[in-house]
Image (cartoon, coloured by chain):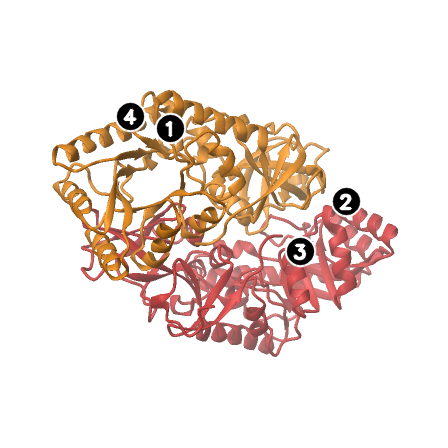
Chain colours: A orange, B red
Amino acid sequence: MLQNMELAHIPTPAAVVDLDRLEANAERLAAKARRLGVRLRPHIKTHKSVAAARIQTRGQFGGITVSTLAEATAFAEAGFADITYAIPVPTTRLHECAELTRRLRSFHLLLDQRETLAALENYARGHQTRFSAYLKVDCGLHRAGVDPSSDAAVELAAAIDASPAVDFRGILTHAGQAYRARSRDEAAGVAAAERDVMIRFAHRLRTHGVDVHEVSIGSTPTMVAVDHLDGITEIRPGNYLFFDVFQSAVGSCDLDEVAFSVLATVIGVYQKRRQMVVDAGALALSKDPGPVHVDPDCGFGVVTTVGQQRPVAGLTLVSLSQEHGVIEAEGELDPEWRPGTRFRVLPNHSCLSAACFDRCHVVRGTEIVDEWETVRGW
Amino acid sequence: MLQNMELAHIPTPAAVVDLDRLEANAERLAAKARRLGVRLRPHIKTHKSVAAARIQTRGQFGGITVSTLAEATAFAEAGFADITYAIPVPTTRLHECAELTRRLRSFHLLLDQRETLAALENYARGHQTRFSAYLKVDCGLHRAGVDPSSDAAVELAAAIDASPAVDFRGILTHAGQAYRARSRDEAAGVAAAERDVMIRFAHRLRTHGVDVHEVSIGSTPTMVAVDHLDGITEIRPGNYLFFDVFQSAVGSCDLDEVAFSVLATVIGVYQKRRQMVVDAGALALSKDPGPVHVDPDCGFGVVTTVGQQRPVAGLTLVSLSQEHGVIEAEGELDPEWRPGTRFRVLPNHSCLSAACFDRCHVVRGTEIVDEWETVRGW
């Protein structure tokens, strides 16, 4: 535990959370959810930290979204009682899901396949249990989910609604295609589509006699950009708590709102090729290529100063190997930069970078005030 | 502990090590080192597992290479007594290095900067200690290391050799540029350059009166491809124990020699777009883009069968998000593929994928015979 220490003195690479920025990010989105009249069920996969989720759910109804059963289990142990497991449920892990269903006030699954419904029914029959599930809808990402314009989608919803094995919770989508936006305006367009596709589909299901309790949507770019949420009951953004370089490129935030960074130390200075090597590589920052659709030369993160987190003009993190990061300068290297100099790197994708670490150092300014453990594995 | 279980029955995503392949990979490289008359100091950063390192060092002198102080500490605890810490030593962590120097029979550092030497000297004076260090040489990768054709390189070597704070161990390089090769022949060219640059530089240092004990080189592509190693004393490949899709593309191995895979389960089948979603995403496979210089459409890993690990013709892992992998088929999806179906994915970069997991399941065929823990953090 490195509490009361300064960032200047801790071992690197280190994951650093700026608590002022994080609290502001949490409050901004919470206020928007209140204003637009929806419940906020934040996705905690970005940080996988109980302490962060407590801040994120302050003044909310307390529900969260998770991406792994390991997260569900750890957050259940920490007292979170209403959890949505937001990947299509693997039929090979129904026993764990049944355990969580028994244990929690609410544990919701996602499904979009006939065969998965059959597996849930088969399990429920054998074990006298009943699951709660959303129908996962594809609103344009084309990763998972039913096509909401298809008859098959209505038929599957009706089958879930009628199933004795499942409490049909409603419909759920994630407009991940918002990450292809180039601005907040473009993200707003995706947000409107995400919302409207779901409102129309909910209406269609209701006209077919299917009882749609929840209409759940949300990604960070769309929830930042969206103008109204009439007809939507809950939103599930996650990244907004940390933000990152990608989010700034698609218009979700400014760089000075990014609350997660990786502290790195210079281990080599190479004047001739105007490069420095730092001790943060792919295992600290991830190989996420970042918003190359907006800026092909974005590199692997934005290099900032330790104290103010001001981007250092002219520096690009041009390559990453396992434990090395190579920073290149446009002009001459500053003679102040030498072995031992530190930078904070804002990662391209904070979810993937944070997951590299077992714990985050939480700071006010540059003083460490807390340490947050993160959940690992699946 | 899932020993005696079958791969069909364990939770996914899971890291799987094929012990037969791994042992064959270990023996092949060890035999080559013996034949070429060099010592093998394997890099353990690929697997970060004590059990794997024990197999890798069987019949060898016992020295290993590590990429983090966390690895050094864990392997020291496990009884490894001769360790090279193969990134330019961070001047902020000399206390830990001094501890390891006291504790181990041999603990070697790397440096390539005047300022780092000054920091070592400063520390050594204050703490009555003496470090062992290699001079890190740039043989063409242009990441870290001195330019061996420069006068500055000779001057720094002489300064280290003359320093009371440091036992000058010799010179060390890593020809990471071999990963840009398109075949084993091209890798052989890089290997010859790596070797010859170092032999010439060692000779030049000796003519300047610098005592060069070790001439240490090595990457997996160059050590697989190299024809002779006269003048070299030790080699430090690491990836060869696992191999991966990238290594097969640069000619280091065949796909049926890859000993590390990620077991994944289908959670969605989407006939219309000829896609499946599996539960192995970027947090299981890493976002390493793979050998795009050889095959721009390589995707994020090779999808193989669970039992024989035969690549499934026509399947490409086209995208990864945090916990989803999308597999696309050239033609129709096989009706046998449904929720619950399993595949083994050979990752693009096994070092980055293995580091996603806290443990590996070790198999003979499809039966789990052991579980190996991996070292985390720095």
Q: Amino acid at mark 4?
A: Ala
- Report the chain holding disc 4: A
Disc number for residue B115: 2
Disc number for residue A354: none
The residue sitting at 45% across, 40% down in the picture is A44
The residue sitting at 40% across, 23% down in the picture is A34
- Report the chain holding disc 3: B
Q: Are marks 2 and 4 in contact (CB under 8 Å)?
A: no
Taking the image as drawn, is residue A244 in sight? no
Q: Is residue A93 left or right of residue B222?
A: left
- Residue closer to the observer: A144 or A130: A130
Crowd class of label 3 (few under 14; some 14 to 19; many from 20; radius 10 Å): some
Image coords of residue B187 (percent x, y): 50, 61
Q: Is residue A252 left or right of residue A312?
A: left
Image coords of residue B253 (percent x, y): 44, 67
Q: Relative to A108, does residue B110 appear above or below in the rendering?
A: below
The Cα–Cα distance between marks 4 and 1, rounded to whole angstroms, is: 10 Å
Same chain? Circles 3 and 2: yes
Disc number for residue B69: 3
